[in-house]
Amino acid sequence: MMDAHLSNRPTLDALRRMPVSDVIALPAEHLALLQTDAREALDAAKRMQDWIEAAIALRYEQRAIGARAAAGKDTGTVRFQDGAVEIAVDLPKRVEWDQARLAALSEQIRAGGEDPGQYVEVSFKVPERAYTAWPERIRAAFEPARTVRTGRATYRLAIMSETAQRDSPHAGALHPLRGAL
């Protein structure tokens, strides 16, 4: 059976309205239970957020793929509307480099009399901006060591004002989706 002083402990909602001096004065057992309650509430909120994010991804994934294809993009951000909501979908690019191949290429560059430090970092990572700026002959040599993956797409929904809807370059081009999840 629970002690009487533990059964009358404040709830998380009540705690929000309590001065910090009152919270500090609570019995240690109350603080421990409130901490557990807060962690459980945070975990539940995270699960709910994940559930909502998954539903949004399912709803808009095909439209994002179409918008990305129409823009000629494999990665990056695309925007489209669903009624009064603008959806911005970001699909990050994740580039990985084959470390053994980069090491061998660095040695070839050094043997050719050039400084490999101009092309690769010591950790054998290649900055993507630098890679895209290289001459074609250098990019072609490095291409077999490069793998491009995508990260997890993120969806940001923003309710737009009537003026923003009217002035949007997407207005009228895309029709709102109704229903299906």
Image: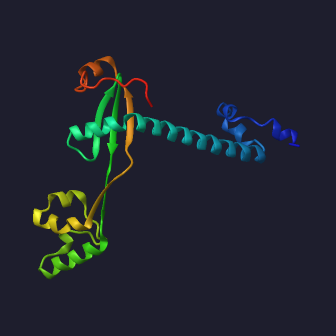
Residue in view at x 38 percent, y 35 percent:
156
Quarter of image, res 31: top right
Quarter of image, res 10: top right
Residue 156 relative to residue 30: left or right: left
Quarter containing the C terminus:
top left
Total residue callouts: 0
Residue 21 relative to residue 58: left or right: right
Residue in view at x 38 percent, y 38 percent:
155
Residue 159 placed where, x, y %? 38, 25
Residue 122 relative to residue 26: left or right: left
Q: Looking at the image, which residue sits at the far bottom?
A: 111
Vertical order, 25 against 157 (above or below): below
Residue 29 placed where, x, y %? 78, 47
- In this figure, which colouring scheme has been used for the structure? rainbow
Quarter containing the N terminus:
top right
Residue 128 relative to residue 25: left or right: left
Camera-nearest residue between 122 and 111: 111
Camera-nearest residue between 179 and 165: 179
Residue 52 placed where, x, y %? 49, 36
Residue in view at x 28 percent, y 18 percent:
163
Vertical order, 181 against 151 (above or below): above
Quarter of image, res 169: top left
Residue 96 placed where, x, y %? 31, 62
Q: Looking at the image, which residue sits at the far right?
A: 1
Residue in view at x 69 percent, y 46 percent:
36
